[in-house]
Image (spheres, coloured by chain):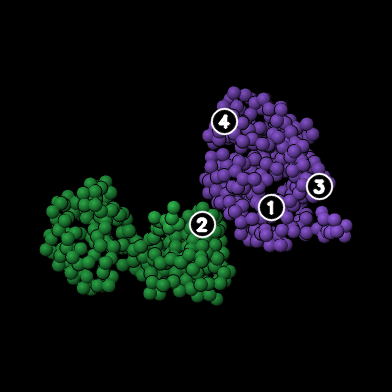
Amino acid sequence: MTDTKPLAVRARMLPIQRLIIEHLDPGSFAQRLTDKLEQAPALFNRAPVALDIGAVLAELTDNSLQQMLDHAREQRLVVFALAGPKDALTPWCERFNLAWVDDKDRAARASKTETTPTGLETQVIRQPVRSGQQIYARGAHLLIMNQVSSGAEVIADGSIHVYGALRGRAIAGVQGDTLAEIVCQNLDADLLAIAGNYQVRDDLHAEPNRPTRVRLEEDQLVIEQF
Amino acid sequence: MAKIVVITSGKGGVGKTTSSAAISMGLALRGHKTVVIDFDIGLRNLDIIMNCERRVVFDFVNVIQQEASLNQALIKDKRCDNLYILPASQTRDKDALTKEGVKKVLDDLAEQFDYIVCDSPAGIEQGAQMALYYADEAIVVTNPEVSSVRDSDRILGILQSKSYRAETNQPPVREHLLITRYDPERVARGDMLDVPDIEEILAIPLLGIIPESQAVLNASNKGMPVVLDEKSDAGQAYLDTVARFLGEEKPHRFLEAQRKGFLKRVFGG
């Protein structure tokens, strides 16, 4: 008997770079990849990446996929998944020992490139959010005109504003929007997260029960109290 | 129009059945024709507190499955003509309840009664959801401690999202907070949550506060709803609660710790 646990599981939401493959020429893929990486080396260095091969699925061969994987891995990308239609991709994922991810972030991605994040719609909740309830504002900011109980979870692609006590978990910018914020009238949260950076209650350097604004600065949550 | 009132809490052991018995008896004593239904299929207790366990022939599940008529299953209380009990089945489980079956029984009861009080089982599964599904009003029973308050919060969420009124976009279920087993001394020592804390967390109107009382245990051992013990603090608190439920204004009592008298302090008490 030892006291140390052999295994513990922690879940974390992290932004995934999705490389969308539009045609299957290995030469041009390698060239475009190199160009992209030169633009933002820090962003892609050892970054978790999914290859979106939905568009080229018809002509895809084991050989061409292997070449793309090799190219990407030479450039220090960590390709761990394929993105696209799940049923069609499952055999490929199994053969190449890769995971599968959804490609459904398109709407959010498109709105982000065409408009600023403040252009998101706002989903408004007027009743209290009770323990065990989960609210996700997909592609929107979330405005709660009531309290969020301990054990409840409020999630938004954009920012979260709570005009009441925030006692549950608040997860803003869940698709990776680092400009998202969490603002509440009365902070007593179990967990705060913005774009995958989170802090649990015990780590929060904040005084409870005060109006609070939380934002992200260089991957750190910055907590401002009023 | 009959009003359907669910007594619920999420957590077990907080006093749902005691409160169901006391409140339904209280309503009946005030002249309202009242029936109390035990939804705790498989773990029935209401019949014991109402002292009718030896008079159960048919039960709620028999009525739902049309093995008996409603009037065969209803048990008339011996102490108050306005009160009837629909006992739970002890031999089935909670899957015997269906939305359609429960609706039929409630519709039939609504023709005869002013108030239909549903005593919910603990938990948030099928049985508890059936008990609250058709409710017009909910009395959420909470003890002054953190886990009970959180479970009540969970049940309030289910009332808002999974009740018939919520699913059909009708005005929401009216929610009332009933704090039971309130011990002013332990609150004063900081061992228990105080009333403002609970009100703030749950954010629903306070209907009543029932003090922790020996009278509750004595009454349930005797098979007597505690409101019949009019001298007891808990009995009076339940009567106040019923009066408030019917729209009267009453101040909350039994909130202060009793000062111990000289003799009690010397000899212990």
Which chain is mark 3 on?
A: B
Crowding near the residue tagged with mark 3, few <14, some 14–19, many ≥20 C-alpha atoms within 10 Å: some
* Mark 2 to mark 1 CA distance (whole Å): 22 Å
Crowding near the residue tagged with mark 2, few <14, some 14–19, many ≥20 C-alpha atoms within 10 Å: many
Given residues B15 and B1, the one toward you in this image is B15
**Residue at the spot x=57%, y=49% of the render?**
B155
Q: Pointer 4: what residue?
A: B92
Crowding near the residue tagged with mark 4, few <14, some 14–19, many ≥20 C-alpha atoms within 10 Å: few
Mark 2 vs mark 4, foreground winner is 4
Which chain is mark 1 on?
A: B
Q: Pointer 2: what residue?
A: A152
Can marks 2 and 3 be said to lie on one chain? no
- Tags 2 and 4 touching, CB below 8 Å: no
- Tags 2 and 1 touching, CB below 8 Å: no
Up-down: is B241 above or below A208?
Answer: above
* Residue closest to the far right: B263
| Direction from residue B216 to residue B45 in the image, left or right | left
Determine the image quadrant of residue A45. bottom left
Which chain is mark 2 on?
A: A
Up-down: is A153 above or below A39?
Answer: above
Numbered label attached to residue B179: 1
Note whether residue A126 is visible: no
Chain B tint as drawn: purple
Picture coordinates of residue A187, whole percent (x, y): 54, 67
Q: Pointer 3: what residue?
A: B232
| Secondary element type, mark 3 | loop
Chain A tint as drawn: green
